[in-house]
Amino acid sequence: MRTEPIPDAVAGARHEEHTARTAVVTGAARGIGRGIAERLGRDGLHVVVADLPGAVEGVEETAQTIREAGGTATEAEVDITSEASTEALVRTAADVGGQLDVFVANAGIAQVEELVDYSVADFQTMLDVNVTGMFLSYRTAARQMIAQGTGGKIIGAASIVAFRPFALLGPYSASKWAVRGLTQAAAMEWADHGITVNAYGPGIVGTAMWDLIDEKLGAKEGLQKGEALEQNARSILLGRVSVPADVAQLVSFLSSPDSDYITGQTILVDGGIQFS
């Protein structure tokens, strides 16, 4: 395991050339990650759009959308469960941007299954991606920011289930509780370096994950397509299911100087389902 800081060449040896702030967004090929990457591009950050090697087409589409809107973007591959891959991603960001300013650890997985049917292998995969992957993302980003001596913003993907678990999402819920705890501990340890660490907690979002939840719940309860989602959505005080842009707006704030006095928080963006 690497314990020394990332080398100077990676730590922003070209700091004098640094003009725009640089952000990494993992899991940016689609859904919430894509929405975040596009918003940060509009905010004027150079966005390193990262996702798995199998998501190259989505990564390219996200990056192209950013460029067409007048922003700058770089495509990158990453497997967040790999220490080497995560370190390579941060090196890429430091090389293309001069330094790393914002790291959005958005990548994660969900599986909809009853606990009694959940396999040990699937449970371990959930922990590998959503917990170990978050740890590697946080740690690697922090090492880069500490080496630069510039501070920075680290932002992770939690969920409403970090406050209130949902049926059929047991291991996913457990992993997001872990993200919330890791975020708090990281904020405590890295505040002296000028690094803030926060997380965002989406509620019911119109993405592929919630389509799958609707399908599984519908099969269990004898409901038609869309009915289970509609029933859950009734708990939203603001009266509509969320879209990626709702989450992206919060991440935009957490990435900006306006949030400099906020750290260690997991902020819900759920339309008023859960109060914390």
Image (cartoon, rainbow, N blue to C red):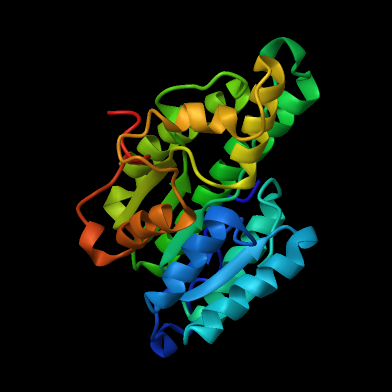
Q: Nearer the viewer, residue 242 or 146?
A: 242
Horizontally, residue 61 falls left or right of residue 232, namely right
Count of labels in the image: 0
Residue at the image point whose x is 38% and y is 28% from the top: 235
Position above or below: 19 against 250: below
The structure residue drawn at horizontal position 38% and vertical position 57%, both measured from the top left corner, is: 251
In this image, 61 relative to 154: left or right? right
Q: Residue 172 placed where, x, y %?
A: 59, 29
Q: Does 193 sit above or below residue 270?
A: below
Apparent side of residue 155 relative to residue 75 in the rendered image (left or right): left
In the image, farthest residue toward the front: 224
| Quadrant hosting residue 257 | bottom left
Residue 212: give x, y in percent of width and height: 67, 36
At 59% from the left and 61% from the top, the residue drawn is: 28
Res 174 quadrant in image:
top right
Q: Is residue 41 visible?
A: yes
State which quarter of the image contains the C terminus.
top left
| Residue 109, horizontal then vertical, whole percent | 65, 40
Considering every residue shown, the one lying at the far bottom of the view is: 17
Is 245 located above or below residue 97 in the figure? above
Q: Is residue 45 visible?
A: no
Q: Is residue 25 left or right of residue 163?
A: right
Residue at 68% from the left image edge and 14% from the top image edge? 115
Q: Position of residue 264 (x, y in %)?
A: 31, 41
